[in-house]
Amino acid sequence: MYNKILVAVDGSENSLRAVREAGRLAEGNPEAEIILITIVPPIDSTFAYSTWFTPQEVQSQEKKVIDALLARAEEIIKEAEEIAKEVASGTVRSVVQVGDPAQALVAYADKEKCDVIVMGKRGRGVIRELLLGSVSNKVIHLAPCPVLLVH
């Protein structure tokens, strides 16, 4: 039924359950493709521009933080890939992007013409979720395709 399944992964147990569920959705369909996506939120360093730090110092620190975030994203993707390859009969590929998680996920699903988005109901950002709103809630309202939330 689903040929292109986009799975949002953030390293949480719910997102790993979403990977397993995507494998079940792809079961028996050798044409199915599972796309794992991890989205690194952008860094807002406007607070750091003051008389305390030079722009070069801020830029140097930003690069270190971004590099650390991207390295963690690669670890998250690798763990999800291992699970996906165990449960999927079709192809598995992965992508890491930087941006607002909900907007980037929806834009990627639209660009790639995904048939369904699978994601955990709650990820790692519980405090962030309370302050900024649920990523899954935003995706449900903006997605160009069905969204399956996994508990």
Image (cartoon, helix red, strand yellow):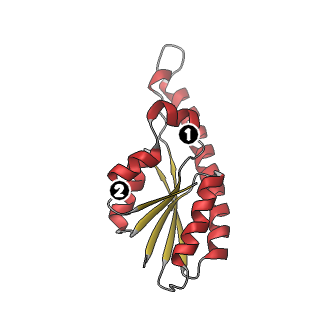
Task: Please determine whether, in this image, residue 52 is positioned above or below residue 40.
Answer: above
Please give the name of the residue rendered at 58% of the width and 54% of the height, measured from the top-left corner.
151
Question: Badge 1 local density, few (<14 within 10 Å), some, or many (20+)?
Answer: few
Q: Residue furthest front?
A: 151
Q: SS at mark 1?
A: helix
Give how far across and how far down residue 19 sits, in percent.
59, 65
Q: Based on the displayed image, in which of its 4 quarters is residue 111 positioned?
A: bottom left
Q: SS at mark 2?
A: loop
Give how far across and how far down residue 121 sits, in percent.
53, 50
Disc 2 marks a residue whose amino acid type is Ala
Q: Name the residue under label 2.
A: 143
Give how far across and how far down residue 17 sits, in percent.
62, 60
Give how far across and how far down residue 115 sits, in percent.
39, 70
Judge left or right: residue 39 versus residue 139: right
Q: Mark 1 or mark 2: which is in front?
A: 2
In-front residue for pair 37/132: 132
Task: Please determine whether, in this image, residue 19 is positioned above or below residue 134.
Answer: below
Task: Please determine whether, in this image, residue 46 is positioned above or below residue 85.
Answer: above
Please give the name of the residue rendered at 57% of the width and 73% of the height, measured from the top-left corner.
23
Task: Please determine whether, in this image, residue 81 is positioned above or below residue 12.
Answer: below
Q: Does residue 96 appear in the picture of this structure?
A: yes
Disc 1 marks a residue whose amino acid type is Lys
Q: Mark 1 points at which residue?
A: 63
Q: Based on the displayed image, in which of its 4 quarters is residue 69 positioned?
A: top right
Question: Badge 2 local density, few (<14 within 10 Å), some, or many (20+)?
Answer: many
* Mark number displayed over residue 77: none
